[in-house]
Image (cartoon, helix red, strand yellow):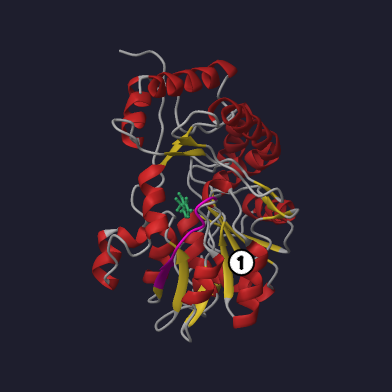
């Protein structure tokens, strides 16, 4: 049995989180029916201030954040929402659940974020919104997206589930579109176990998000709009507050780790290391290389080799969303529909870059990758 196990991601949880959760548990106030308990409200205030927006609304997952955002914008039957094909399926599922149609578009071959020109070409008279995704924490091309959206009267909902603290031309993601959505799932740069946050400068969107997360109740048992129970608990918010206070420091460690990996891997033939435009600061959620397949030198073979050597590497995502059976069946997408996203899905491999990696771990990851390629 191999001793070493380097995980693709690991939450950084310390005594501070344990203490803060214990304090909440001792109060006996675990949650509030309206979702705005003391800790949740404090977490919302701090998160809004960190991202640089007026309002933040906490919910219980990133999926809930996206769903709530769509509902608050009034997106429903007959509407189309443009979604990049390289994303986690949640980005599209929430559109479908709202009764609208996700329309998948190609991604930029370098950043794997939405291709702006393809986005523009996909707009129809039914298009109501677009959801740019900051893939792996690398910001989408927000200026061009906002220009097109403004021109065509579209709502922009940023999927920042992987991009806590990332910036685009000096602005934090989640503050650039009309609404931003974050996930606090356990693997993310900051976590509450499960959880999510919506950010916006629009008071009416914020009000509707608050209503939607608690069955549309303005007062208890007085629903004024449809909704669900998407509330965050007080103890999750207590974890979130501590995690938020560590985010910048931990992101800086991720950036350093990414630099070390790039320095060591960039000259290996067969590997393409990630690059970013000079005006963005990514959050480095994962470190994603492209493996250009040669004989016996496939991405899957490298993943298996790393796995056998105790290194967890992951494929985000083995199928672009348009090739999930659900969406192939609903809209007739097939292999070949969006070739850039499909090629990326065949080649991407995400390596660990999280702050718990030691220098020795990083050296070991590099050594094993070099070893794999030296055989060919
Ligand atoms: C790009 C993207 N969007 C949405 C989500 C959904 O977030 P959650 O898992 O918190 O529901 C994720 C989470 O993994 C994600 O990576």
Q: Nearer the viewer, residue 215 or 81?
A: 81
| 293 to 154, vertically: above or below | above
Q: Quadrant of the N terminus?
A: top left
- SS state under label 1: strand
In the rendered image, which quarter is residue 56 located in?
A: bottom right
Residue 360, position in %: x, y?
A: 55, 15
- Whether residue 128 is in magenta: the answer is no
Of all residues, the one furthest to the bottom in this rendering is 125
Q: Nearer the viewer, residue 249 or 166?
A: 166
Q: Judge from the rendering whether residue 240 lies leftward or rightward of residue 85; answer left or right.
A: right
Q: Which residue is mark 1?
A: 179
| Percent coordinates x, y for residue 341 in the rendering | 41, 56
Q: Residue at x 38, y 51 (%)?
A: 343
Is residue 103 on the magenta stretch? yes
Camera-side residue of 164 and 287: 287
Q: Is residue 214 positioned above or below 76 on the image?
A: above
> Which residues fall within the magenta stretch?
102-110
Please provide percent x and percent y for residue 186. 48, 40
Q: Is residue 158 visible?
A: yes
Across the whole image, how many numbered discs are drawn on residues?
Answer: 1
Q: Residues within 10 Å of mark 1 (few under 14, many from 20)?
A: many
Residue at point 49% right, 55% down? 62
State which quadrant residue 8 falls in. top left
Quadrant, the C terminus: top left
> Residue 368 appears at what percent x and percent y?
43, 20
Q: Is residue 250 above or below residue 203?
A: above
Q: Say whether mark 1 is within 8 Å of ligand 1.
A: no
**Would you say residue 89 is visible in this rendering?**
no
């Amino acid at each position: 049995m191999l001793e070493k196990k380097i995980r693709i991601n690991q939450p950084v949880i310390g005594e501070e989180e344990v203490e803060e959760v214990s304090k909440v548990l001792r109060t006996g106030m675990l949650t509030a029916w309206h979702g705005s308990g003391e800790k949740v409200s404090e977490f919302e205030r701090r998160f809004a201030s960190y991202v640089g927006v007026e309002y933040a609304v906490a919910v219980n997952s990133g999926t809930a954040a996206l769903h709530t955002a769509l509902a608050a914008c009034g997106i429903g039957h007959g509407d189309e929402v443009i979604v990049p094909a390289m994303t986690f399926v949640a980005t599209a599922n929430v559109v479908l659940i709202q009764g609208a149609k996700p329309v998948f578009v190609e991604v930029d071959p370098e950043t794997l974020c939405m291709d702006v020109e393809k986005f523009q070409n996909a707009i129809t008279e039914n298009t109501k919104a677009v959801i740019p995704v900051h893939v792996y924490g690398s910001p989408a091309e927000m200026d061009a997206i906002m220009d097109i959206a403004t021109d065509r009267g579209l709502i922009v909902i940023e999927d920042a589930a992987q991009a806590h603290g990332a910036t685009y031309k000096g602005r934090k993601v989640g503050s650039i579109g009309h609404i931003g959505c974050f996930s606090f799932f356990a693997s993310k740069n900051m976590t509450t176990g499960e959880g999510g946050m919506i950010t916006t400068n629009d008071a009416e969107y914020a009000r509707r998000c608050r209503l939607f997360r608690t069955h549309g109740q303005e007062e208890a048992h007085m629903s004024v709009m449809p909704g669900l129970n998407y509330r965050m608990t007080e103890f999750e918010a207590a974890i979130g507050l501590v995690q938020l206070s560590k985010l910048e420091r931990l992101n800086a460690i991720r950036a350093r780790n990414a630099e070390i990996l790039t320095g060591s891997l960039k000259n290996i033939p067969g590997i393409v290391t990630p690059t970013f435009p000079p005006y963005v600061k990514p959050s480095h959620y994962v470190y994603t290389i492209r493996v250009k397949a040669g004989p016996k030198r496939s991405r899957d073979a490298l993943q298996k080799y790393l796995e056998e050597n105790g290194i967890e590497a992951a494929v985000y995502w083995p199928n672009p969303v348009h090739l999930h059976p659900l969406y192939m069946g609903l809209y007739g997408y097939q292999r070949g529909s969006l070739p850039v996203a499909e090629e990326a899905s065949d080649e991407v491999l995400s390596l660990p870059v999280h702050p718990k990696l030691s220098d020795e771990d990083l050296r070991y990851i590099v050594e094993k990758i070099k070893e794999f390629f030296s055989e060919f």
